[in-house]
Structure formats: structure tokens, C-alpha cells
Image (cartoon, helix red, strand yellow):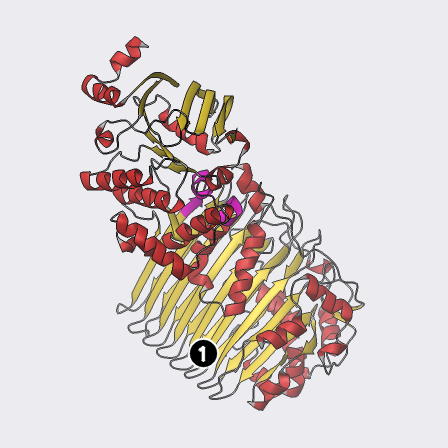
Amino acid sequence: MSSVLENLVNQPYRHGFVTPIEADTAPKGLNEDTIRFISAKKSEPDWLLDFRLKSYRHWLTMQEPTWPNVKYPKIDFQDIIYYSAPKPKKLASMDEVDPELLRTFEKLGVPMNERAKLAGVAVDVIFDSVSVATTYKQKLAEVGIIFCSISEAVHNHPELVRQYLGSVVPTGDNYYAALNSAVFTDGSFCFIPKGVKCPMDLSTYFRINTESSGQFERTLIIAEEGASVSYLEGCTAPKFDTNQLHAAVVELIALDDAEIKYSTVQNWYAGDENGVGGIYNFVTKRGLCKGRNSKISWTQVETGSAITWKYPSCVLLGDNSIGEFYSVALTNHHQQADTGTKMIHIGRGTRSRIISKGISAGQSNNSYRGLVKIGPRAENARNYSQCDSMLIGSKSGANTFPYIQVQNNSATVEHEATTSRIGEDQLFYFTSRGIGAEEAVSMIINGFCRDVFQQLPMEFAVEATKLLGLKLEGSVG
Amino acid sequence: MIRAGAEILLEVKGLRAKVAGVEILKGIDLTVRAGEVHAVMGPNGSGKSTFAKALAGHPAYEVSGGTAAYAGSDLFALAPEQRARAGLFLGFQYPVEIPGVSNSAFLRLAYNTVQAVRGKDELDPLEFDDYLREKMKLLDIDASFLDRAVNDGFSGGEKKRNEILQMALLEPRLAILDETDSGLDIDALRVVANGVNRLVKPDNAVVLVTHYQRMLNYIVPDYVHVMDGGRIVKTGGKALAEELEARGYDWVKEAA
């Protein structure tokens, strides 16, 4: 690999700093007492404590999955802090937010108060595990939208949470989902009532702050009949040497004619250039197209984490429902990503579309793993999948594992895949026309990712483009 | 056009270059003045392409000796993109494909980068589109070029036309065309020759690297150089090219 390419992709992580905010922290380790501690801290009703304990007992019987194409040392679940919260405060306005926290966001280039105002985005900020402030809540409330932390929802809208929590990702779905169901600390809750089009994009910035605090978020979004919402999730974390486990669960439910668009930009600490440190991102995201003509669309730009294990999926239950998955996954150094989607076609006339772009640099390994399943009742179901891989240099790897199961012979399933490489010759072609190598790489990458970026909401697309540029920018001279 | 007092655009002295540790160029001397057209000919493996790429700065080609002055300054002190911005152009023998990057965006970025260095105004996408279409019309290039990715899925002839289009846009002072004529049908050859002839002006120069004489039926060179074994072994006028076509390269090798 040429030195130009190496410089380009070997950018140090820029968001490495720790904000000194006092945390109210649980002792390390996991047992039923830890779970009771979390539940008590959050003054939860009994049914939720039962939900947690049931999940925990199930988790104890399960095995850590070994099928992903990733390698990491065994996780010691007793060496993790499961609850850590800033001093609880109720804030009426952004002015009351801890200035230290605001500075943190500024360092990240995300001045949230300005951002919220200028972009018209309501930001439900998750700092470590507790919501610190929620903006625009009132404006949303006027049209009947509930957008709050899941802890608040548990207290204020228990009937909704109880009805839908665990309905898409059951407590025993997989090892990490079971763990999350036992110990989740906070997350977002969003409810769009019948016929309401959410007037603005809803956005949450996640940030892992206390060293060794595993972060277990829980997000639940419900769009009732004819409702629609676009939800943005952006993440970044400070630099630590010990690995941090992140096992979130996101559940989406779309009823008849409803539409949910969920976009993620993920830039957690990926470890250093020798593969030390970095976040383990083991996430379960699933959407249920419960109603007819409903639509769920996942868009993700994954650039961080030491290990990514993530398959945002759609269960297409309602007739003529639509599932979409658009993904860019960039890995560098020793990062490992095993990511993709599952499209489960159950209803008639269901359609799905998968566009996956994997970029591997350094010694990283990037796998697409996807399942397209057409059930026996899914008459005339259609799927189109396109999985493209780009290799930067000669030491990185890319794999595609498409699984296709068809149980109805009226279905149409298409799969296309390509692999390309950015090498010396491509870069020289640009430089010989006066274009700098940095700009060249960014142009190639943006071109490669265009089909996915087009799916992101405007300001998020700009952020994603910048982020990839940042990741690939270097001291080219 | 040879003019005794014209500015020296390129002066190469004793140039040696290696590829993967093997010395290919073994001492090349060449002087190109403004207004001149040079043809560099020679058998396969004589070092013609290495010479072209070493001048443009391909990172795989290591200059191991000698000097090259471009318009009076040290060429090898410049990064490849700086050479391009200073008006050096390399037309590739095998232009690479760049999927996903639109040809029009690529051309505009290259054009604006070079314009900015020359202290001229950059063009916005609409203005550039007009300018580009005009150039394409002159060169008889199909408009569908713009919507496609750079060289992606282009035929051999289309790739070469795209090279000539880039040359026409960037208006280089010194264009080095590496076997731009190879693999072209007669129509494409005319397009390429037309593009080159349009470029040649009193303050520009062209170095045509070619294996065959047929390109020189359309572009009349002022000098013809024959390379062999990493050196220029013979220099003459247009008549030399015709003699090479008739007699092959062996007699030059023997004479050298």
C-alpha cells in the first residue's frame, strides 16, 4: 500500500476526551441485585422489573454467539458497570444544561442548542444513560407526538411501553438482546399517533462517557395508522483503552400505511492503530411492518467501533409492506464489522430493497451478512439486493454472506455484488489531473456511497460526508 | 513548429528511472521548446511509457538519476498534482476506470483546480456544463459521456477520447500522450489527432509517445526520436518516422 493511502486512512480519532461529570454509579458486576438496583434507581413499576428479571434468567441459559466473522477476547460480564448516571436534574430549558456537557458537544462539533434551533431538530440527549434534556417536546406534544426518554415513558405512558416493549425483539431473541432487556438503562421513546406526519426529524445523540460503563440503550418507536416519522441517531465516544460493550436494542412498529425512517451515523472509538481498545457494538435493531402498506427504512453509516455486529432488519408482516436497508460500513486498522440485514417477507406483495456498501482499509475486515426470507404466504414478494465492497490497500478484507430462503414460487429475488479496489493507479489518475490525493479518495468514496447518502436526511448526509472525509483525511503532502 | 529562440518547456538530462528496482531508463536527454511537436517512437519494452510516467510523477516509477526542468523549474521537486497544475498533462495508455465518480464532476473538479492555480475564475456546474459541451462538440464526443462514471465501462476508443477531452479542458502547456493512438479505429484516431492539432499553439508543446507511424499521418511532428534499451538512440524529422514504418526498428538498433 502506498504511503499516501496509509496516511489518508490512518487518521487518529478526534473525539477522544473524557468529560469530568459526577456519576451515580452501580458497583461492577451483574446479578439480580444489580438489576433490582437499576430498577429501583429508576423507580420502575413491578411489571418492568419482572421483564428485566425474566430476561436475565433467560440470558443465563444462553451462549454468546460465535458465528459472526469477528474475533475478540472473551467478555467478562462481571467486570462491567451496568448503571452510571449524571446527577439527575429536571431541566426546563437548554440554559440549565451542565456547561461541561455543552462543551463536550461543542468539541464534537454538535452545538445541540443551536443545532436544534437552526435545523428544527428536537434532540433527546442521552448522556451516559440518562436523558439530560429534551427539546421541542411541547411543539411535538401539540400534534400528539410523544418523544421522550424511555424512563419517562415508563412513568407517563406505561400502557404503551408495556404493550410494545419486547414485541418486536423478544427478551430471549439473542444473547445481547436478552442482556439488554435485563439491564437497559435508558433510551428513547417515540409515539406518532394515527394520521400524524411528524413535522420535523427527531434526533438523538448518544455518547458513552464513564470508563467501563457498558451502555445498554433501549429505543422504541411506534407509528400508528397513517403516521410517519424520520428518526436520526448519531453517536461518538471518548477514547479509552479498555473495551466497552455496547448492546442496544431498537424496536420499530409501523401500523397500517405508516412509515418509519431510521437513520444512524455511528462513529464510536474504534481502538488504536494496533487494535487496542475500542467499542464492541453488538446491536439488535428490528422493525415490524405490522400493518398493510407500511414501510420501514433503515439507513446506517457505520465508521466507528472496534467490532460491529449489527443487522437492522424488517419483518414484513402486513400485506404490501416495504422494508429497506441502506448501509455504508467503513473499517480501518484492525476494526471488524459483520453487518447486514434480514428481510423477512410474511405478507402478500411485500417488497424489500438492500443496498450495502462496505469499505475496508488497513488490516480491517468487513463482512456483509444478510438474510432474505420469503415465507409461504408471501405471494408475489420481491427483493433486490446489491452488495458492493471496496478495498483500500492490499491488507484489508471483504466478505459477503447472502442467505436466501424462498418458500413461495411467485417471489422474485435478485442479488448483485461487486468488489473494487482503490489503488495507486486510481489515485495517480486524479493527481495527474491536478486533484490532490485526499480529495481524490473522498471523491471516490462519496461516489461509491452515493446511493446510500441519498437516503439520509439533508443535514445528516452532510455530516456523513464530512465524517468519511475526516476518517480518510491525513497528512498528504 | 521549430523556432530557435522559443522558450524551453522541458529539458531532460541523463534521466534514469527504475520500476520495482529494475532500471528501465538509462540516461535520456530531450529538449522540448514551445510550439514543437515531438514523437517518441520505439519497439515494445524500449522504455517509452516509463519515460512518460516518470515525467508525470507516477509513484511506482523511481527517478534514480538525471534532471528534468519544466519551464525552468525542477520538475522532480513537484508532486504529481503540482505538475498537473503547472500545466503538464499525461494522456494515459490505459486510463483507469473509477466507478461511482461521475465524469462531469471529475472533469469540473480537475478544471476548476487548474483554473484556480492560474488565477482564473472557477465555473459553477451550469457554466461548466456549457463550456464542456462546447468542447465536446468540437471534438465530436457524445454527450452521454457526462452522465457516466469516469471511464467506467467505456470502450478502448471512448477512454482515449475522454483523455483528449480532458486535455482540451485543461489546456496544458506540455502534453505527453502515451500511446493514445493504440487500439483506435480510424474515426477515433481522427478525433484524437484533431484534439492534438487544436492544442498545438506557439506557447504549447506536445510529446507523442507512439509505436506506429499512422498517427503521424494526421499530426506532423517536428522531431522524431527513437528509443531503445532505455535511451534515445536516434533523432530526426518526420522522414525518420516514415523510414521506421518502412524498415522497422532493427536497423536503428544495429546502427546504434
Mark 1 residue element: strand
Q: Residue B163: x and y, percent?
A: 34, 42
Crowd around label 1: few <14 · some 14–19 · many ≥20 (10 Å): many
Identity of the residue drawn at 79% across and 73% down: A87
Identity of the residue drawn at 39% across and 74% down: A322
Q: Amino acid at mark 1?
A: Glu
Q: Residue A227: x and y, percent?
A: 47, 84
Using the image, determine if residue B184 lies above or below residue B231: below
A83 vs B256, left or right, is: right
Q: Is residue B173 magenta?
A: no
Q: Quadrant of residue B130?
A: bottom left
Q: Quadrant of residue A280?
A: bottom right
Q: Is residue A424 magenta?
A: yes
Along the line of sight, the residue nearer the viewer: B58 or B243: B243
Q: Which residues are magenta?
A: A420-440
B9 vs A233, left or right, is: left
Q: Is residue A285 visible?
A: no
Along the line of sight, the residue nearer the viewer: B78 or A387: B78
| Image quarter of the C terminus of chain B | top left
Q: Which residue is mark 1?
A: A259
Q: Residue B94: x and y, percent?
A: 34, 37
Along the line of sight, the residue nearer the viewer: A229 or B132: B132
Name, please, the residue furthest toward the right. A22
Using the image, determine if residue B105 lies above or below residue A41: above
Identity of the residue drawn at 35% across and 30% down: B36
